[in-house]
Amino acid sequence: MRRLRYGTFLKYWNRKWTLVLKFRSQSEFAQCDICQELKSQYQNRNLCMGDRLQALKLYRTHLVSQYADRCSFWSLKDVAADQLSRILVLATDGADQAKYAIPRSPGLVHAHRAQKLVRPRLKLHAVWSFAHALRICVLDETTFHGSSMVIQALAMTIEDSMRIAGSRGAKPDTLAVIGDNTVKELKNGFCLRYLLSLILHKRLKCLRCI
């Protein structure tokens, strides 16, 4: 399987997809709750200097912890690219509750009558198995986007990754899953029990959720 450079993606994106596939600016992303809370505390002039300095110290500690998480993520990506490491690294995430109405086209003329129509909306969820596979799930609006759907996406991606890795000569025995700390993603008993069952049935030897 050939790997494409990021520059190749940008070249084709600039050529054809800039009007359809648009990326949000950094100002449009939601800020971390802890960052927002600590920043408001050390910027509050009504608090005493000691409390403001303590909030600033906690804020810097929080940033260091976030950077450590990013470093772990980058290291796992590099390790997953090495077939001899036998480590399978998965990253799962949804579209942050963003729903896309279809048809979606830059040349679509929004007539007055068309705007009154209720267009179907889609939900997106992806699981990326580094160095192996990328699964993008496109769901109908009525499909339940919960832990059961996440488990199904994880299971199908793990199965595909094991088959691809086996064809290359070395099946992974360690699994690392990266996801949001939410009930829908990894913070639920159903998903954790499924991942633990892979170890109980000796499909894997080690599990790590990040």
Image (cartoon, rainbow, N blue to C red):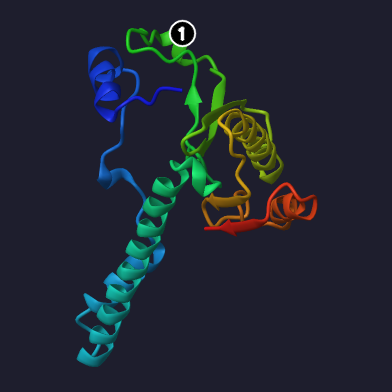
> From the viewer's perspective, is residue 179 above or below residue 134?
below
Q: Residue at x 69, y 56 (%)?
A: 192
Q: Determine whether the residue tagged by mark 1 lies in a helix, strand or loop.
A: helix
Label 1: how many residues lie within 10 Å, few (<14), some (14-19) or many (20+)?
Answer: few
Nearer to us in this view, 63 or 161: 161
Q: Is residue 7 left or right of residue 186?
A: left
Residue picked out by circle 1: 113
Q: Which quarter of the figure has residue 58?
A: bottom left
- Three-letter amino acid code at the position of disc 1: Arg
| Residue 125 x %, y % | 55, 35
Task: Return the x and y of residue 131 as percentages of the image width and height.
Answer: 46, 35
What residue appears at the point 26 percent right and 46 percent down from the top-left corner?
27
Nearer-the-camera pick, 190 or 120: 190
For residue 187, say whether it is visible: no
Where residue 120 sits: x, y (%)? Answer: 57, 19
| In this rendering, position of residue 122 left or right of residue 204 | left
Asked where in the image residue 121 lies, by quadrant, the reply is top right
Q: Residue at x 37, y 51 (%)?
A: 74
Looking at the image, is 135 positioned above or below residue 19? below
Q: In this picture, is 24 found above or below 138? A: below
Q: Is residue 208 left or right of residue 149?
A: left
Q: Residue 37 at x, y = what percent?
A: 35, 70
The answer to which of 154 and 99 lies nearer the viewer is 154
Query: Going by the picture, which residue comes out furthest to the right?
Result: 201
- Res 117 visible: yes
**Residue 201, placed above or below residue 114:** below
